[in-house]
Structure formats: C-alpha cells, structure tokens
Image (cartoon, rainbow, N blue to C red):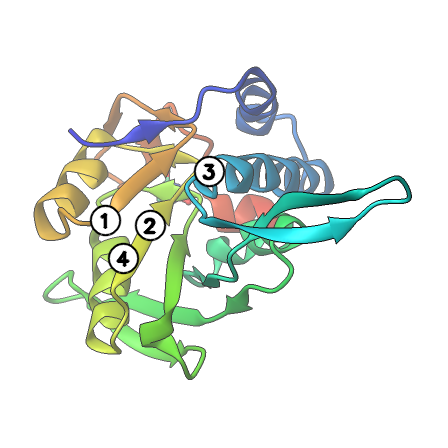
Amino acid sequence: MQVKIIDHPLIQHKLSLIRDIKTGPKEFRELLDEISMLMAYEITRDLPLETTEIETPVAKCQCKMLAGKKLGVVPILRAGLGMVNGILRLIPAAKVGHVGLYRDPKTLLPVEYYCKLPPDVAERDFVVIDPMLATGGSSAATIDILKREGARHIKLMCLVAAPEGVLLVNKQHPDVEVYTAAVDEYLNDHGYIVPGLGDAGDRIFGTK
Ligand code: URA
C-alpha cells in the first residue's frame, strides 16, 4: 500500500477532536480548516524554488522564492469543499476546480454530474481533495477526469483513508501520491470507514 501518512502531532491531535461524536459542525469546520492548512504545508514540500536577488535594509542577498509552479485544487463535492479554505490560506494563488459525482444505483459506479476546471489544466499540478477515502471509487474517477482533461501531475489528499480506498487508487493510478492523516481499519457494509468520523459532508454542513 503506497500512502504518505502525515503524522504531525498537531494534525493527529486535531484529527482526534474531529472524530469525536460530540464535535458539532462549527468546530468540525474549524478543525478541518486547520488540518487542511497543516496538510497543505506537508504536500507542498517538493515545490521548486529559484534564487532571486533581494535587497534587505542592510545588504543585497540571494534568496529563495517559489519558482512559480501553477497549482490547482479540486475538491470532490460536497465534503471536499470543507478542505478548500485551509489550503487556499497557504496557497492563495491556487485555482480551484470542482468535480461532482453520484453513484449509479444499478452499477454502483461513480457518474460525473459536474466538472469545472481551470482552463490551463496541462500546466498545473493538481491536488484532489476529499476528507474520506472510502472505496476509492470517487477519487479514482476524479483523477480519471483530470487526466482526461490533460492533467499530468496529481496528488490526492484526504483526512481519513480506508485501506480499500488506498489500494484502489494505487492500482488505478500508480502515479498519484496519496496523502492522509490516518489509515483506519476497514469499510463497513454501509460504506463507512471504521472507526472514521461518520459522514464528513453531514458533519461539515449539519445535515442528516
Ligand atoms: N464518506 C464519509 O463521509 N464517511 C465515511 O466513513 C465514508 C465515506
């Protein structure tokens, strides 16, 4: 199983709070925002730098700046929306695409109902975001869509993953690095990650 677990103590602490059934939507959103920002810090570790001359009040110096790589963030509707703002706080220049999928009741396969991406897909590095990597079907389908539209560099960032979901994405997209704060035990018969945190969309938006 190829997965990068981001085990920073702040992330792990906040993840435990977010799992708690007593955590309401306001706190859940705030925690998800904070965790997403901290995870964005980790997934951008490999961004290229270039040297540029800066004049400080004391002297000129050769300093490092981001080399201007274009980034795109693609939340999978709807729970992925809960991770967008935290990422944008660290990477404000990133463009945000959206992908919506529903599960066909007969085939159980994900069907695309919405896709709006930045125009220059081939020039961007993308991060697909969804808090819960459960079966992996939606994430793999979203990555398919991005590749179909010309994306070449894609990472997947989630909060909690099931082993089943990681393995599916690894199998269908071996080129895509998967980042998560935790790999939980298994998926139950209702498609929930165990122990997980319940339905992420419902907990973000206060729905049932
Ligand atoms: N989606 C969720 O929101 N939670 C799960 O446990 C699995 C899928």
- Tell whether label 4 touches label 1 (CB within 8 Å): no
- Mark positioned earlier in the residue sequence (2 or 1): 2
User: Which residue is denoted by mark 4 in the rendering?
Assistant: 138
Residue at mark 2: 155
- Extreme-bottom residue of the structure: 119
- Whether residue 206 appears in this view of the structure is no
Instruction: Report helix, strand or loop for mark 4.
Output: helix
Earlier in the chain: of badge 2 and badge 3, it is 3
- Residue 184 is left or right of residue 129, and the answer is left
Identify the amino acid type marked 2.
Lys
Do callouts 4 and 2 mark residues in contact (Cβ within 8 Å)?
Answer: no
Q: CA distance from mark 4 to mark 2?
A: 14 Å
Q: Position of residue 21 (x, y in %)?
A: 57, 26
Q: Nearer the viewer, mark 3 or mark 1?
A: 3
Label 1 sits on residue = 176
Q: Is mark 2 within 8 Å of ligand 1?
A: no
Q: Residue at x 41, y 60 (%)?
A: 76
Which circle, 2 or 3, is nearer the viewer? Answer: 3
Q: Percent x, y for residue 11?
A: 56, 25
Tell whether label 1 touches label 3 (CB within 8 Å): no
| The N terminus lies in quadrant | top left
Measured Cα–Cα span from mark 4 to mark 3: 26 Å
Disc 2 crowd, CA 10 A, few/some/many (<14, 14-19, 20+): some
